[in-house]
Image (tube, rainbow, N blue to C red):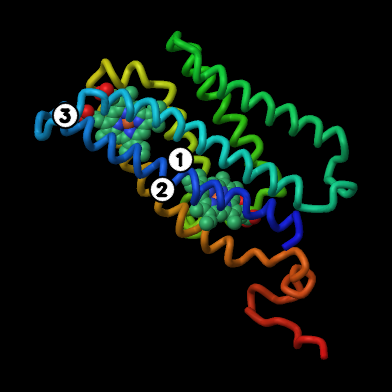
């Protein structure tokens, strides 16, 4: 495999090796936290703290995972000397990338509610801004079309939003019953989205040819599902 193919699989590898095991642990600790609060079982008192601490890592890992996907998709869409928009656009995108990461760092350490809300929104806006680039392939932007719901992109950025919400609202989830309920509902949805991402991501991986196969595969007609006859 060429270096560029290894770059393509960096995002799926991180998802499989890091995100999904971590999600499993966070969900297990979430269930223990809830059963401890409802007194239906007696897990150790540390489960809430552990859930919240590993939840922070999960949120950071999901943001990192999506940023890696965008960086690879945008940087490897065409040879670097043919980069659409040249150095000016590449520099702007790099600034957005750095700003998004800095904003996420600030969100992790901010304590004032207003600052947490602002940094969560800026981080999400940065992710959406990078995802809106023409190099990032989207089947549909219309939520009323079935293609929208089958697509890896929108659910990916949605789950980033859900993670940022949990991270930003951590103190309130601890204190306020309404936000705790909202957190549980939002993250039930997040668990479904993680499963959907596993399905659509694996599908996408199957559809992307290795770099040396691309000239032949992209000569095929994807609508009619036909390919030119192979050369002798
Ligand atoms: C897969 C993702 C997640 C799921 C399914 C989940 C679910 C839950 C559940 C069921 C509870 C217990 C609620 C109760 O006692 O009624 C909880 C508590 C909590 N969660 Fe999450 N959560 C997730 C991710 C996160 C993330 C990313 C963070 C933040 C970084 C977070 C922060 C918290 C906090 C601070 C509490 C309160 C802990 C305590 O009571 O000591 N969670 N979560
Ligand atoms: C937490 C789980 C995941 C999230 C949030 C996520 C999110 C994303 C996002 C936002 C993109 C960029 C948009 C796009 O090109 O479609 C992307 C690309 C991609 N993801 Fe994931 N992903 C996850 C898991 C996975 C898994 C498990 C796989 C495969 C095993 C995978 C395979 C891919 C591939 C191959 C691409 C590039 C697709 C393309 O170029 O069209 N992802 N992912």
Query: Which residue shows up at 39% across the image and 31% down it?
Result: 55
Dot placed on the residue nearer the N-terminal end, 1 or 3: 3
Dot placed on the residue nearer the N-terminal end, 3 or 2: 3
Q: Secondary structure at mark 2?
A: helix
Q: Nearer the viewer, residue 36 or 145?
A: 36
Q: Secondary structure at mark 1?
A: helix
Q: Nearer the viewer, mark 1 or mark 3?
A: 3
Q: Which mark is residue 159?
A: 1
* Left or right of 41 in this view: 151: right
Q: Nearer the viewer, residue 7 or 230?
A: 7
* Left or right of 229 in this view: 55: left
Look at the numbered discs 1 and 3 and tell me whether their residues touch, using CB distance below 8 Å: no
Q: Which mark is residue 193?
A: 2
Query: Which residue shows up at 33% across the image and 27% down it?
Result: 50
Q: Is mark 3 within 8 Å of ligand 1?
A: yes
Q: Residue furthest right?
A: 81
State whether residue 129 is above or below residue 147.
above
Q: Where in the figure is residue 145, as x and y percent of width and height?
A: 49, 57
Q: Which mark is residue 36?
A: 3
Query: Which residue shows up at 13% across the image and 31% down it?
Result: 42
Query: Which residue shows up at 22% across the image and 34% down it?
Result: 32
Q: Locate the C terminus and report the quarter of the image it occupies.
A: bottom right
Q: Residue furthest top?
A: 112
Binning the other alpha carbons within 10 Å of mark 2 as few (below 14), some (14 to 19) or many (20 upward) gives some
Look at the numbered discs 1 and 2 and tell me whether their residues touch, using CB distance below 8 Å: yes
Q: Is mark 2 within 8 Å of ligand 2?
A: yes
Q: Is mark 1 within 8 Å of ligand 2?
A: yes
Q: CA distance from mark 1 to mark 2?
A: 7 Å
Dot placed on the residue nearer the N-terminal end, 1 or 2: 1
Which quarter of the frame holds ligand 1?
top left
């Amino acid at each position: 495999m060429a270096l560029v193919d290894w770059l393509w699989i960096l995002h799926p590898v991180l998802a499989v090796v890091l995100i999904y095991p971590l999600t499993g642990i966070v969900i297990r600790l979430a269930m223990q936290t809830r059963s401890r609060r409802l007194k239906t079982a007696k897990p150790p008192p540390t489960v809430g703290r552990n859930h919240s601490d590993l939840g922070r890592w999960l949120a950071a890992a999901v943001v990192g995972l999506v940023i890696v996907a965008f960086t690879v998709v945008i940087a490897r869409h065409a040879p670097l000397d043919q980069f659409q928009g040249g150095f000016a656009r590449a520099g702007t995108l790099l600034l957005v990338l750095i700003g998004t990461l800095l904003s996420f760092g600030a969100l992790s350490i901010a304590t004032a509610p207003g600052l947490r809300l602002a940094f969560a929104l800026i981080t999400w806006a940065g992710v959406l801004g990078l995802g809106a680039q023409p190099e990032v392939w989207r089947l549909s932007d219309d939520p009323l079309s079935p293609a929208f719901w089958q697509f890896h992109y929108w659910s990916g950025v949605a789950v980033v939003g859900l993670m940022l919400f949990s991270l930003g609202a951590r103190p309130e989830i601890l204190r306020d019953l309404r936000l705790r309920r909202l957190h549980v509902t939002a993250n039930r949805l997040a668990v479904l989205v993680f499963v959907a991402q596993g399905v659509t991501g694996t599908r996408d991986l199957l559809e992307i040819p290795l770099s040396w196969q691309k000239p032949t595969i992209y000569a095929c007609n994807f609508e009619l599902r036909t390919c030119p006859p192979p050369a002798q």
